[in-house]
Each structure stands twice: as C-alpha cells, then as structure tokens.
Amino acid sequence: MTSTLEDALAALRRGEAIGLPTETVYGLAADASNPEAVRRIFALKGRPADHPLIVHVADAGQIDRWARDIPEAARRLAAVFWPGPLTLILRRQADVPDEVTGGQATVGLRCPDHPLALALLQAFEGGLAAPSANRFGHVSPTTAAHVRDEFGSAVPVVLDGGDCQVGIESTILDLSGATPRILRPGRITRAQIEALIGEVAEGSASDSPRASGTLDAHYAPRTALLLMARAALVAEARQQQALGKRVAVLAMAPLPEGLPGIALPADADGYAHGLYAALRSLDALGANLLLAQRPPASRDWLAVNDRLRRSAAGAGWDQEAT
Ligand code: TXA
Ligand code: MG
C-alpha cells in the first residue's frame, strides 16, 4: 500500500519510525525531540546506541533550534548548499536528546533536497532524526522497495519518493572544532566547501566526533566483494569460473564480454547514483564472489571509492553480527 504524507505525519506524531526519501539515500526517520521514538530507530536498525544520528530540518532557520555557538562558516554553507547533501556537525543545544547525539557535545544537521521530505518537514514543524534506512552495516537503500526489503512490516509507513538522485550519503563536515574537517566524503566536494570557507581538513582526527559511516566494513553486500583493476578482474573472473565458482561483476561500462554482472556509468555521479541498487541486485544473484572494477583514483571519484572500499572490507564475513 502506498503511504501518504498524512500517514507519515500521523506515524511520526505517534512516535513511530517511517521510511523517508531524500536526494541521497532513504532515511529511517523519527521525531528527533522524542527520545523513545529515536530509540526505536536504533532497535530497528540494530545499531549501537552510541552512534549519533543526523537531524533533518526544513531550512537553515532551524539551525539555532538544535545548535549553538554557530560559526559564520555554517551559515554560509547552509545558505549555498541547503537543501542539499551536506551535513554540518555543530555544538548542540542542551535539550537535544542524548539518544540523537550518542551522548556527544555535537549534533549533525542537514536539510534534504527532496520535495516529499521538505513537505513533510514543513508540516511536522520539528526535526527528524534519520540514519540511512538499512540494517546496521548493510547497503543503504535508494528506493522505497529497498526500505521494505530491509524492514518489512516493522516499518509500515514508507513514503515513496522514487529513486534517490545522488545515491550515496551526504558529505559530513565537522564545524565543532578549531579546524573544519570532512568526516565523510559525498557529492558536495572539498573544493566546493573550500571555495566558500577556506581550507578544510579531511579524514577523522583522533578527537573527531564518531561517525559510523567511517567504520570499515560498512555499506556491505552479503556476498564477498573484491576490488581490482579491470584486466585483473577479467582474468580472476575467468579463473573462478573455471573452478566452477559463480562470479558476478560490477564494472564501469561496458560490461566485460561474457561475464555476468552490472555495468555502471563511467562518470562518478552516474556511478554513485546506481551503486547501492547494483550492490543489492548483485547480492541477490547468489554468486560465490563479487568482483568490482576499481574506479580511477582521481578526486571526483573520492566518495565512490570510499563506499566501495568499505563494501569490500566487510563483505562475506561478520555480516550476521553487524
Ligand atoms: O545522506 C545522508 O546523510 C543520509 C540521509 C538519510 O540523510 N543519512 C545517513 O545517516 O547517512 P547515517 O546515520 O547512516 O550516517 C550519518 C553519519 C553517521 O556516520 C553518524 O555517525 C554521523 O553521521 N553523525 C551524526 N551525528 C554526528 C555527530 N554529532 N558527530 C559526528 N558524526 C555524526
Ligand atoms: Mg548509514
């Protein structure tokens, strides 16, 4: 059954979690000011309770409701990139539930660029805590059907906003410390951020806030996945086939001749858009092994390479536990 905006509002007001479309990936959203509702998200995902959630807001005017000591850089970035795939980590207001922040002194804020999400946020008149709507460690969902596959009747209300346009999670920028730092790469690039606020650091520092998307073994399909250069991949696939193994390939277009699998566009944005759906489809083939062609190492492929590396790190082992 198709869920409506009214269904979603009613469920959120009852303290339930819903499937929320955004331009990046689908979120599992609940009322960010209701600790019990937020705890439901963790229970549904099987996510450790000390991993903080992003609060989704209707517009930049909401920043002060959730954060304080807000640097000028945050205002400038929000003015340009919101609604859009940029999450800002800021010092939190005292009344933000510990369930949302993982007990940390900071809160992550983002305004999603999706008409349904924005309409819901405006009608709800509050913040929505929402991690990606997948079980912990698994591939993020980019369609409403993916969310239903993950949670079934445990999450009865899923707003169908179509295929997520970006396809990988937002860029996370920590503005709570002395130096701005990108904790997770995404569609909004370091160069775009630096053009507005000057130099930023990249990667997590020892005192950085925790970000679960920064764990190895994340975004993982259940089938083992190996990353390799195209020529090596073709040779490996043939060798595995000769041994009677079933392999499937994730290539940059075109698909190598005679090998089963999926070819994604050879540009970084097009590839990101299709990546998670491709991983889910490949997983469903029941192959013994997934072989993914390693994309170029250039900067425009940074976010895709980050997700692929984590998919490869975890696949095939420890998946039941995460
Ligand atoms: O594009 C996205 O960001 C999607 C959509 C649904 O908005 N959400 C998403 O949520 O990717 P999640 O929970 O799967 O990843 C959010 C990341 C996590 O790595 C979390 O640890 C980090 O944001 N995060 C949230 N609040 C934080 C905070 N206060 N300090 C540091 N990291 C934080
Ligand atoms: Mg996630």
Image: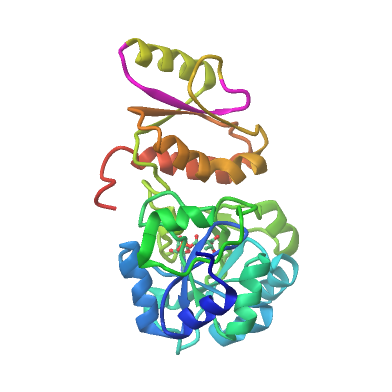
Query: Is residue 134 located in the magenta-colored stretch of the structure?
Result: no
Q: Which residue lies furthest to the front in this view?
A: 1
Q: What stretch is highlighted in magenta?
A: 243-255
In the image, residue 134 lies at what x, y percent? 41, 57
In the image, residue 127 lies at what x, y percent? 54, 80
Residue closer to the observer: 209 or 322? 322
Q: Residue at x 64, y 81 (%)?
A: 122
The chosen color scheme is rainbow
Please give left or right for residue 271 compared with residue 287 in the image: right
Q: In which quarter of the image is residue 304?
A: top right
Q: Residue furthest top?
A: 242
In the image, residue 100 lies at what x, y percent? 42, 76
Q: Which image quarter has ligand 2?
A: bottom left
Note whether residue 306 is visible.
no
Whether 142 is drawn above or below 68: the answer is above
Please give left or right for residue 200 compared with residue 228 in the image: right
